[in-house]
Image (tube, helix red, strand yellow):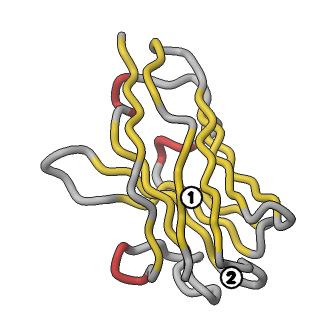
């Protein structure tokens, strides 16, 4: 049974950084897609970044440009999302998602991912 657990969230001041980690159990992730989404109350969940085979990252949304970096460790079956220069607009619940194959890596839609974490809150204060 695949389980995804997010960690590393919390509160930070504007301009600060946070690193989120998604730890997957019961999951190999080899030649498969892991992804990060975020959601603000009242809005749709949006794709932030994807990671194929723990090594090939893609980013989605202008807000990620130059500030977000995704990486992975196949030995630990983890995916990290490093977020720099955070602003209050980055306040959201962040979710980790994964598939057993590459599905979703080029176009991260909620409906395309099989496994989900519970989500973790990130709050950025001005």
Q: Which one is closest to the eye, mark 2 or mark 1?
A: 2
123, above or below 1, in the image: above
Of residues 123 and 5, which is closer to you in this image?
A: 5
Of residues 117 and 16, which is closer to you in this image?
A: 117
The residue located at (55%, 65%) in the rendering is 35
**Relative to 36, 70 lies left or right:** right
The kind of secondary structure element at disc 2 is: loop
- Residue 99: x percent and y percent? 56, 82
The residue located at (63%, 66%) in the rendering is 24
Name the image quarter holding residue 56: bottom right
The residue located at (81%, 65%) in the rendering is 55
State the quadrant of the N terminus.
bottom right
Q: How many marks?
A: 2
Near mark 2 (Cα within 10 A), the count class, few <14, some 14-19 or many ≥20, is some
Separation of marks 2 and 1 at Cα, in angstroms = 14 Å
Name the image quarter holding residue 100: bottom right
Name the N-terminal-most of marks 2 and 1: 2
67, above or below 24, in the image: above
- Residue 115: x percent and y percent? 47, 76
Question: Residue 49's mark?
Answer: 1
**Relative to 56, 66 lies left or right:** left
- Residue 32: x percent and y percent? 68, 82
Are circles 2 and 1 on residues that touch, CB within 8 Å?
no
- Residue 114: x percent and y percent? 45, 82
64, above or below 10, in the image: below
Residue beneath disc 2: 32
Of residues 12 and 49, which is closer to you in this image?
A: 12
**Relative to 126, 66 lies left or right:** right
Quick one: which residue is furthest to the right in this view? 75
Quick one: which residue is furthest to the left in this view? 42
The kind of secondary structure element at disc 1 is: strand
């Amino acid at each position: 049974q695949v389980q995804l657990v997010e960690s590393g969230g919390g509160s930070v001041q504007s301009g600060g950084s946070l690193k989120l980690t998604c730890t997957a159990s019961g999951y190999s992730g080899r030649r498969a897609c892991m992804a990060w989404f975020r959601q603000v109350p009242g809005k749709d969940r949006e794709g932030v970044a994807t990671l194929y085979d723990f090594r090939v990252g893609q980013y989605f949304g202008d807000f990620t440009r130059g500030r977000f970096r995704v990486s992975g460790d196949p030995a630990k079956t983890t995916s990290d999302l490093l977020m720099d220069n955070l602003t209050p607009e980055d306040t959201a619940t962040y979710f980790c998602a994964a598939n057993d194959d590459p599905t979703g890596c080029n176009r991260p839609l909620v409906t395309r991912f099989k496994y989900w974490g519970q989500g973790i809150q990130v709050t950025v204060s001005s």
